[in-house]
Image: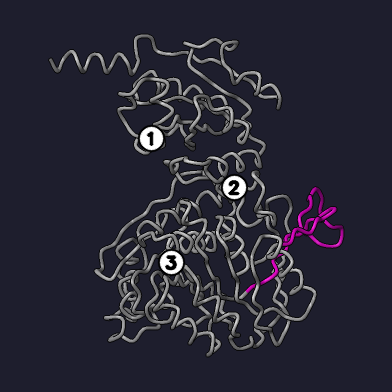
Amino acid sequence: MTAAARAAAVVVVGDALLDRDLVGTAGRLAPDAPVPVIDDPVDHSRPGGAGLAAALAAADGGPVTLVTALGADEAGGRVRALLEDAGVVVIDLGLDGATPQKVRVRAGTQSLARLDYGGPAGSPGAVTPAARRALRSAGAVLVSDYGRGVAAEPSVRGALAQAARRSPLVWDPHVRGLRPVPGVRLATPNRDEARAFAERLPAADGDGAGAPGPREGLAAVTATARALVGAWQAAGVAVTLGARGALLVGADGTPLAVPAPVLGAGDPCGAGDRFAARAAVALAAGALPSEAVTEAVAAASAFVAAGGAAAWRPDASTASDPFRPPAPGPGSPEPAVPAGSAAEVVAAVRARGGTVVATGGCFDLLHAGHVQMLQAARALGDCLVVCLNSDASVRRLKGPERPLVPAADRAAVLLGLGCVDAVTVFEEDTPEAVLATLRPHVWAKGADYAVEDLPEAPMLETWGGQAVVLPYLPGRSTTGLVAQAVTRAR
């Protein structure tokens, strides 16, 4: 995430809910019915709906305002407090009814039941002067429509239509909501939502989209997205496909498939909000829709792997928050991979009680020795994070002619290996700072080191970690490859 992304103001408009997880343990069945008994449930509350989208956008570092409608009840007050704790400015239009609540009853990570409170949607109030001012100054606007009336309120909808002419507008639709206002930069339905909206289109409006047709496969998704681009007068429609990533179709009809990285199973609750929030933050920073969708897929995948909405914490200012990318130091270049992805992978593994392994190096020209060492390191635990020297760091260590391959490309090659789960770039000569943040259980290096020579070893011991050395294929080195290439070129 760039510095511009962290500074750009995002305004989220939509229906906020109170989400609660009642989490306990289940070790027996009730004597009067074949249902589990949940012992000692703990109530974990978080903002839901548009509230979660706003909290996640705030975790990406920039100022965020939420325009929503809350009831004058305990649930509404709780949502407001949670959002303010997360750094979100709340503009409440007022709700003529109860603040909706969704309660999941869970045994550990397994959901057993969901209880919904709030009944039919209440009537939100009209747009306020404060809401209009926020929309006029927004770097980007995200409409998180949960079909409960905020985005459909006539004055709000009119203000959004005006906002779409000034700023990038992302519309995350709901099947119970209305179609987006004309001119949105990006609409982000999931596959089922896209299909439902397309089936409502008249044949002339959707170029036959309303007629029955193939319902599966990328060809069907592409046809649906093209129909919605035209009908909604949108610059782009990104259909989210869960673990398969997203498919973006722009005004020219060209489909761009953005696959999701494989980060392991997790809780998909809130993934759509994470996707839309990151896309809006990226667009506010000046990203192209294709760049915003690529960022959003990576962020949503990491979010799911880290535990989804259930892992959300209200204080997004702490370094341990897995959903907030760490700010770079003065003069630091942009990391080569999405900042925070390593932290998200580590958080997911820790949540499962797994072992975190890290290694580090320049990896300038990847060779068989590197690959064997990385595979051996990954076998020591449940994830492998590679701490990669930045270009400036490599120059200091290896000389002014190195690196031969820039950090972005070195990270991409490493991430292409099945044994590497995440890459994080560091600027220093040694990775103590990044290790202090990740706190891996194991720090592994090639056998050309001895443990007592590793400057990181004493640090690992402070949190109970262990530094180890691994077998290394003899005769393989980047320096040797460079020398051979120069000799053969003469």
Q: Kindly identify which numbered label has been placed on residue 306.
A: 2
The residue indicated by pointer 3 is 191
Magenta-tinted stretch? 16-45
Asked where in the image residue 43 lies, by quadrant, the reply is bottom right
Q: Kindly identify which numbered label has been placed on residue 144.
A: none
Q: Residues within 10 Å of mark 3 (few under 14, many from 20)?
A: many
Element at label 1: helix
The residue indicated by pointer 1 is 407
Q: Amino acid at mark 2?
A: Ala
Distance from the alpha carbon under mark 3 to that under mark 2: 23 Å
Asked where in the image residue 56 lies, by quadrant, the reply is bottom right
Q: Residues within 10 Å of mark 2 (few under 14, many from 20)?
A: many
Query: Relative to 102, is 162 on the left or the right?
Result: left
Q: Tag 1 or tag 2, which sits nearer the N-term? A: 2
Query: Relative to 265, is 87 on the left or the right?
Result: right
List x then y, in percent, for residue 350. 65, 38
| Residue 182 or residue 112, whichever sits in front | 182
Is residue 131 highlighted in magenta? Answer: no
CB of mark 2 within 8 Å of CB of mark 1?
no
Q: Amino acid at mark 3?
A: Arg
List x then y, in percent, for residue 348. 60, 43
List x then y, in percent, for residue 222. 31, 66
